[in-house]
Image (tube, rainbow, N blue to C red):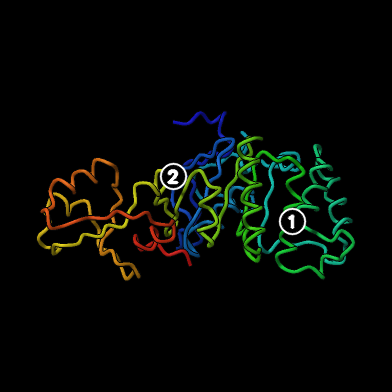
């Protein structure tokens, strides 16, 4: 079991019930310094409930969780000096100018990095003298980021951070988050429906379904073991049964492949080559994270 002292986030048996509805069901999860965890799932899967439990907005029905070694039920103002949360629906004082708001936020943190804040303002192209109420949705998200990251947190919780951002800014934010994780050891948890955006930045993948943890593994390994499988020159029924055991049928996906596998490795490729007749051929094609989740019938909306 992971050493709780080293874990930025430690969750054990975490459960939340609302009368007869179980929103989160015995969740076990750890996030280490420098990890970027993509926490995915459909609406109602338990993502928001998890965040609210971690931030001490909800009290758990069962189980426990801790952030930076402090039980979530005991988090106070001092603890939040190193714990930050950014949401797509972030509430900000719209009457304030951008520079006024950032200056206001700086006073809440002990290690505010003003130089870093100014670099973010410049790289994001934010208008310092403009009032927040006149900003676009994407610009408002940039302000939320610029009002948080200069505090140099140890844990960052992001709820739909890519919403409303243009393609260039999404890539810029992904690179920034990845850099902070790798260089500063920042632990990050991202929830999003824009699953393609987590591929360049996330190091781990966790998927919730109906309140239960369905997947928890390194993202690279999860994607590497999934492939579209297209067999030509032979009917599916004539394929050796030992090979069929590695295949799963696709569910209404617009692709020439009729199957996919979640067990791909070089040995499997060799096994297919050896057991298929000479007139047949097989092609293994990489899948995106959205294609994988769709193939498994794991909805994200």
- Side of 168 where 260 appears, left or right: left
Q: Is residue 298 above or below residue 13?
A: below
Please name whichever residue, 239 or 233, is drawn nearer the observer in this view of the structure.
233
User: How far is the residue under mark 1 from the one under mark 2?
Assistant: 29 Å
Image coordinates for residue 241, horizontal then vertical, percent: 11, 53
In the rendered image, the vertical position of residue 121 relative to residue 77, given as above or below: below
* Residue 180 drawn at (x, y percent): 65, 40
Across and down, in percent, residue 284 comes to 29, 53
- The residue pinned by badge 2 equals 220
Q: Residue at x 85, y 59 (%)?
A: 98
Quarter-of-image position of residue 290: bottom left
Q: Is 34 placed above or below 290 here?
A: above
The disc at residue 6 is none
Q: Nearer the viewer, residue 299 or 77?
A: 299
Q: Is residue 158 left or right of residue 259?
A: right
Q: Residues within 10 Å of mark 1 (few under 14, many from 20)?
A: many
Residue 144 marker: 1
SS assignment at label 1:
helix
Q: Nearer the viewer, mark 1 or mark 2?
A: 2
Front in this rendered view, residue 3 or 155 = 155
Q: Secondary structure at mark 2?
A: helix
Above-or-below relation of 84 to 127: above
Q: Residue at x 62, y 49 (%)?
A: 157
- x and y percent of residue 77 in the render? 75, 43
Instruction: Give the residue displayed 47% in from the left and 59% down from the top.
Output: 41
Report the residue that reaches farthest toward the front. 279
Quadrant including the N terminus? top left
């Amino acid at each position: 079991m992971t050493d709780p002292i080293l874990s930025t986030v430690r969750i054990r048996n975490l459960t939340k019930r609302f009368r007869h509805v179980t929103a989160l069901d015995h969740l076990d999860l750890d996030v280490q310094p420098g990890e970027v965890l993509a926490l995915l799932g459909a609406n109602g899967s338990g993502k928001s409930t998890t965040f609210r439990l971690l931030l001490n907005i909800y009290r758990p029905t069962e189980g426990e969780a801790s952030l930076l070694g402090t039980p979530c039920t005991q988090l106070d103002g001092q603890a939040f000096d190193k714990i930050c949360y950014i949401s797509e629906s972030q509430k900000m004082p719209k009457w304030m100018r951008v520079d006024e708001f950032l200056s206001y936020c700086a006073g809440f943190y002990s290690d505010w990095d003003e130089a870093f804040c100014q670099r973010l303002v410049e790289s994001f192209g934010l208008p310092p003298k403009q009032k927040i109420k006149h900003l676009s949705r994407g610009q408002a998200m940039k302000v939320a980021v610029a009002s948080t990251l200069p505090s140099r947190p140890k844990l960052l919780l992001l709820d739909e951070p890519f919403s409303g951002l243009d393609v260039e800014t999404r890539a810029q934010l992904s690179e920034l988050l990845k850099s902070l994780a790798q260089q500063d050891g920042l632990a990050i948890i991202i929830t999003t429906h824009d699953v393609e955006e987590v591929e360049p930045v996330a190091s781990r993948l966790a998927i919730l379904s109906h309140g239960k943890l369905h997947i928890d593994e390194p993202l690279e390994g999860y994607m590497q073991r999934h492939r579209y499988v297209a067999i030509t020159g032979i009917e599916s029924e004539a394929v050796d049964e030992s090979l069929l055991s590695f295949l799963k049928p696709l569910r209404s996906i617009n692709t020439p492949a009729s199957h996919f596998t979640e067990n791909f490795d070089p040995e499997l490729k060799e096994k297919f080559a050896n057991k298929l007749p000479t007139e047949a051929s097989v092609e293994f094609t990489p899948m995106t994270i959205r294609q994988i989740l769709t193939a498994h019938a794991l909805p994200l909306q």
